[in-house]
Image (tube, grey):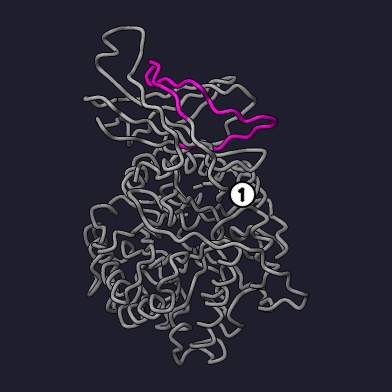
Amino acid sequence: MRPPIRLTAVAAVTAGFAAVLLPLAGPSAAATATASCGVSYADTNDWGSGFTASVTITDTGGAAISGWTLGFGYAGNQTLQSGWNGTWSQSGSQVTVTAPSWSSGIAAGSSYTTEANFGYSGSNSAPTAFTVNGVVCGTGTGPSPSPSASPTPTPTPTPTPTPTPTPTPSASATATPTAPAGSAPQLHVSGNKLVDATGRTVTLHGVNRSGAEFSCVQGTGIFDGPVDQASVSAMTAWGINAVRVPLNEDCWLGLSDVDSAYAGSSYITAIKNYVSLLHQNGLVAILDLHWTDGVYTGNSSACSSATATCQKPMPDAAEAIPFWTSVASTFKGDDATVFDLFNEPYPDRASSTATQAWTCWRDGGTCPGIGYQVAGMQSMVNAVRSTGADNVLMLGGLAYSNDLSQWLAYEPTDPDHDLAASWHSYNFNTCSSASCWNSQVAPVLAQVPLVTGELGENDCAATYLNSLLPWLDQEGASYLAWTWNTWDCSSGPSLISDYSGTPTAYGAGFKAHLASLG
């Protein structure tokens, strides 16, 4: 979003399972003869009042299990909150999970894992019986691994102007609390999941921290508001596990249009220090190239300047490639930092056809309607990998990252196979309905991890979130809300009214949803 002008399909958690694989026993000999399966169950993250249940179905027979429905029951008061990688429902103590539309079958010899968060009080005994398509399918439980971040899945809109925020000092004058012990997960891609170093699925749920993309070039500082331990503690109190930090290429590269006090080594050091602070608090950092160079005055132009003072339809090759080469060299070896290659591409506003736009998106070079040499996604992937950095890379689609319709067809080549799709979703976007999400977004997240890098609504309410977030949870997608800044909520999606974490009405909706996930 424009600031003011100013996760294989099978989660790798089965190592902790003590699976029991039994032949399918059912009401008829025919059923027994045609299918065989095993089910393993684990409580992967119990925090005392809730937990994450992970259930893996394995087809141990010679034929595929099609259109599966899993059933089991709890002996206690476990109550379903949200599920993903399947459609979860509960009636009394009985839980039912049906296959998602994008993965309705399990091939012979293969497995599929579906997960959900539950609340409970008292005891938390594991289920003792499971059915698949109504037929008993064995039981199995495993020990609960040590707690990890509760999985919750992570959207930006066509830009709308908002007022320039009043600059807030970058440093807090109050005493800074000691950072709590903790370390952020080292991420890689496995199938369509983000996983940590142990192979466990990590689903990001977090916020954007806008400021470093505009404050430096506007001459007001490096950040908009505090970036100290107290401000980060306010974020973690909401239960987040990731923060997206938009950047400015002119400020990082120390170009002459930026005050030297806020550019080059000063800017880089400030970003490094903030990323380090986030990691100390167990938070994944996402670094996003947000404002770039290049004169563009065509459709949806945000400014006519050649310098990085607004969003451009695509990044410029002259500066974006050196930018990513430098950023990758700086954070190489830190896989708790993800690179979002370009915030919100919109070459479709400059091109006459979708093919032209998607080709420009991937290949760059000379693009219709854009008067500068474009850095395509493939060249930026190459720039990062040329440094030896194997960080996860996020790639947003067209229409300000809201259009993923041909993302898979134009996906760049990555020797490390660590690409994730970035999607932005706001109530005023074109793809803002469940029918669009199911037809356009679900096929992408079935193949690669989906990180909804920005989401929100421009009415200071949470109505759109209440439909979008459960869908993302169900599909196992990551998401980060825009934005953790104290701007006027009525003019744009601002989560907070002060940096101690007091939520706006919109922020209260997001905070409540995170709390519901445990």
Q: Nearer the viewer, residue 174 or 387?
A: 387
* In the image, residue 311 above or below residue 356: below
Q: Magenta region, mostly helix, strand or loop?
A: loop
Compared across the picture, whether 26 is left or right of 148 comes to: left
Which quarter of the figure has residue 175?
A: bottom right
Residue 487 appearing in the image? no
Residue 412 screen position, x and y as percent? 25, 62
At horizontal 26% and vertical 9% (from top left) the residue drawn is: 30
At horizontal 49% and vertical 47% (from top left) the residue drawn is: 153
**Residue indicated by mark 1:** 510
Q: Nearer the viewer, residue 463 or 91?
A: 91
Compared across the picture, whether 366 is left or right of 429 comes to: left
Residue 493 screen position, x and y as percent? 59, 58
Which quarter of the figure has residue 12?
A: top left
Please give the range of residues in magenta.
115-140
Q: Nearer the viewer, residue 171 or 465?
A: 171
Q: Is residue 335 magenta?
A: no
Q: Residues within 10 Å of mark 1 (few under 14, many from 20)?
A: many
Q: Secondary structure at mark 1?
A: helix
* In the image, residue 511 above or below residue 339: above
For the C terminus, which image quadrant?
top right
Name the residue at the top extreme. Answer: 28
Name the residue at the right extreme. Answer: 174
Which quarter of the figure has residue 348?
A: bottom left
Give amino acid for label 1.
Phe
Residue 495 appearing in the image? yes
At horizontal 54% and vertical 68% (from top left) the residue drawn is: 3
Q: Is residue 124 magenta?
A: yes
Residue 182 screen position, x and y as percent? 59, 62
Residue 324 screen position, x and y as percent? 37, 76
